[in-house]
Amino acid sequence: PTAVATSPRDTAEDTDRLLAEPPSGTVQAPAASPPSHRRCWQQRRFVMIFICLITMSQCYIVDIPGAIGIGSGDATIQARFHEKGKTYNQVMNQGLYSIYSWPSTVLALVGGYLIDKHLGLRRATVLFGASLTLGAWLFYAGVHTTQYPLMLAGRFFAGLGAESMSISQSCFIARYFPGGDGVALAFGFTTTVCHIGATANFFGSPRIASAVGVDVAVLLGAIVTLVSFSAAVILALLDRHAESVGAVAISHHERFSSSNNTQTAPFRLAAFLKLPASALLLSAICGFVYACLFPFIGIARNFFTTMYGLKGTDAATQVAYFQIACAIGSPFIGVAIDCTGYIIVWLGSLCLGFAISHVIFALTSAVPAPLMMVVMGLIYSAVVSSMWPS
C-alpha cells in the first residue's frame, strides 16, 4: 500500500482528538443544560432570603456564652451555676468556644468533602442544619439543668453544623451567582446579616436574661435554630425546583449520582501541597485574624467589666457596637476597596491596624470602649472585604 505522508500538525490534531474522546465503555454524566438567566434572577431573591435566615440564626447562637456567660450581676450562666452550688468560671466559659471551634478546624474540611463526594449540596445543608439545631437544644438543656458536660456536647454539635453550613451557604451563593456576577455583593449582604444576628444576641440576650432568666434567653437561641433548620429545608426544596425549571444547572453531585458508572478522583490530602503560596498566605492571614478576634469576643464582657468598670448589660453592649460597625460598614468598605484597588496594600495596612487596636486595649483604658469597638469592627470588615477578591 502507498504510504500517506502526515505532517506533525496533523499528528498533533489526531492526538488531541483521541485524548478528548472518552475511553470505550465509560459512562458519561449527562451534560447540564445552560440555565435561563431570567429564571436564575427570579430564583436568586428567594434563595438569598433563606440563606440570610440561616446565617442570622447561626450567628445569633454562636456568641451566647460571650453575651451571658460570665460577668457581674445575676443574669449570667455563671450566676445560675453558683445558685446551684456549682463552679463556673472564665476557663469553663472559654472551653465552650474551644470545643465549638477546634473540631471544626478539621471537620469543616470533611463537610466540604461530604458535599462534593457523597451527600450533595442539598442533603448536606439539611444535615448540617439538623446538627446545629441539636447542639443548640443540648446546650439549652445543659444550662437549664446546670450540667456543664451537656453544654459542651451541645457546643460540639453546634460547631459541627454551623461551620460546615457556612461551606454550604458559600456553595449556594456560587451556584446562583455564576461567573462572579454579583457574588461579592451577595457575600457582603450575608456578612451584614450575620452581624445583625450577632448584634441581636449581644443586645437582646443580656436584657432577656435580666428580665425573665438566663435559661429563657438560651431557650430563645434554641428556638432560633429551628428557624435556621426550616430555612435549610426550604432552601433545598427551592434548589430542586430551580433545577427542574432550568433556573440553575444540575449540580455536579446529582449529575454523577445519576450515572450507572460513577468514576471520580479519590480525595487526597496531598492536593493541599499543590496550592499556590498566595492561597496558603491568605489562609494564614485569615487564621491569625480570627485567632485575635474570637477569643477576645469570648472574654469581652469580663474584659470591659475589669478594664472599664462597666457592669452587666453595659459590658455586653460594647461588643454589640463591634457587630453594628461590621454590619453597616461592610458594604461601603467593599465598594471603596473595589474602586481604589491596591488590595494587598489594604490588607497589610488593615492587619497592622488590627494589631494596634489590640495593643491599645491591652495598655490603656483612656480611649472610649465604644470608639475602639467601632474602629475594630470597621477594620475587621475591611480585612474580610480585602481577602475575598484576593
Image (cartoon, rainbow, N blue to C red):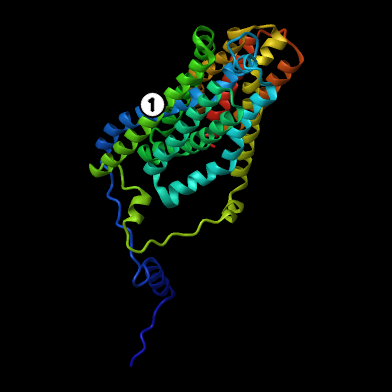
Q: In the figure, is residue 354 to the left or right of 191? A: right
Tell whether 256 sits left or right of 60. left
Q: Residue furthest bottom?
A: 1
Quarter of the image where the N terminus is located: bottom left
Amino acid at circle 1 = Val
Identify whether 162 is placed above or below 8. above
Image quadrant assignment for residue 88:
top right
Residue that extends furthest to the left in the rendered view of this protein: 245
Residue 381 coordinates in the image, percent (x, y): 55, 24
- Within 10 Å of disc 1 (Cα), the crowding (few <14, some 14-19, many 20+) is some
Residue drawn at (62%, 44%) of the image: 280
Look at 66% across and 26% down and name the residue there: 92
- Of residues 209 and 67, the one drawn nearer to the viewer in this rendering: 209
- Count of all numbered marks drawn on residues in the image: 1
To which quarter of the image does residue 98 belong?
top right
**Percent coordinates x, y for residue 378 in the rendering:** 57, 19
Counting from the top left corner in percent of width and height, residue 192 is at: 46, 22
Q: Residue 71 occupies which quadrant of the picture?
A: top right
* Circle 1: element type: helix
For the point 32% across and 60% down, which residue is it?
259
Depth order, front residue of 100/42: 100
Find disc 1 in the rendering and name its residue: 227
Q: Is residue 165 visible?
A: yes
Residue 341 seen: no
Quarter of the figure that contains the C terminus: top right
* 380 is higher (above) or lower (below) than 167: above
Which residue is the extreme one toward the front?
85
Residue at x 43%, y 36% (from the top left corner): 130
Give coordinates of residue 346: x percent, y percent. 60, 28
